[in-house]
């Protein structure tokens, strides 16, 4: 056997080539994994989330009266369960900015962006479809048609809802408040021969 005099194998003590990966791991990857872990523990998701709903056939609102929305296509649309639309409410107008969708049953839907106020919510923001009748019932209970919804229920909505707003100008309890109004209106619909106040004029 011929031995190469220049060959030198040091086995386990052989030095490993240095790379930039270790620096990258400590400076970038490890901090990201640490942040993702903290976010996962707090919210249940390793990364921030967002949600964007849309309208299928949006139509812009040209004018708002106390009785109806005047749409860009010329139609005059009233809101079920609502006798008076809040013409000057900023939250209601926020839901009209991207247009509205008129469904077959007469319900009118808009879009509203909700920002979480709880640090445990994985969503940074959510743009959701919102029933405008339910929204009006929450922001202005006096606008609910008391010929359909009992007056004592309307009074309860007025007195027991927190309408303090966040830095975006939206009520903190918007989602739960609108959900409560939806349950009330659904209960009215389940009564025998319910009466609903809405119309769509061409």
Image: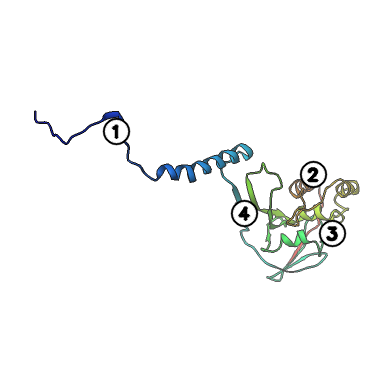
Nearest to the eye among marks 3 and 1: give it.
Answer: 1
In front of the other: 16 or 36: 16
Secondary structure beneath dot 1 equals: loop
| Residue 175 drawn at (x, y percent) | 73, 48
Give the Cα distance between marks 1 and 4. Answer: 59 Å
Q: Look at the image and tell me whether residue 202 can be seen.
A: no
Q: Earlier in the sequence, mark 4 or mark 2?
A: 4
Give the Cα distance between marks 4 and 3. Answer: 28 Å
> What residue is at 32 percent from the left and 40 percent from the top?
17
Q: Earlier in the sequence, mark 3 or mark 1?
A: 1
Question: Which residue was labeled with disc 1?
Answer: 14
Secondary structure beneath dot 3 equals: loop
Say whether marks 4 and 2 touch (CB < 8 Å).
Answer: no
Q: Look at the image and tell me whether residue 198 can be seen.
A: yes
Q: Earlier in the sequence, mark 2 or mark 3?
A: 3
Question: Which residue was labeled with disc 2?
Answer: 187
Nearest to the eye among marks 4 and 2: give it.
Answer: 4
Question: Which residue was labeled with disc 3?
Answer: 83
Image check: 21 left or right of 86? Answer: left
Which part of the image, by quadrant, shows the N terminus? top left
- Identify the image quadrant of residue 100: bottom right
């Amino acid at each position: 056997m011929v031995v190469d005099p220049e060959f030198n194998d040091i086995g386990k003590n052989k030095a490993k080539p240095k790379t930039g990966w270790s620096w990258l791991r400590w400076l970038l990857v490890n901090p990201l994994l640490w942040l993702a872990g903290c976010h996962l523990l707090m919210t249940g998701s390793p990364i921030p989330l967002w949600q964007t709903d849309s309208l299928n056939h949006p139509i812009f609102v040209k004018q708002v009266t106390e009785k109806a929305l005047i749409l860009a296509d010329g139609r005059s649309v009233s809101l079920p369960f609502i006798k008076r639309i809040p013409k000057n409410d900023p939250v209601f107008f926020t839901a009209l900015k991207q247009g509205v969708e008129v469904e077959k049953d007469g319900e009118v839907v808009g879009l509203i962006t909700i920002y979480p106020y709880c640090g445990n919510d994985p969503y940074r923001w959510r743009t959701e479809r919102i029933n405008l009748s339910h929204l009006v019932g929450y922001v202005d209970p006096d606008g609910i048609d008391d010929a359909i919804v009992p007056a004592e229920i309307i009074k309860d909505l007025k007195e027991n809802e927190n309408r303090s707003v966040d830095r975006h100008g939206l009520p903190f309890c918007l989602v739960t408040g609108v959900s409560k109004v939806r349950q009330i209106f659904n209960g009215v619909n389940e009564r025998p021969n319910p009466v609903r106040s809405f119309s769509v004029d061409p």
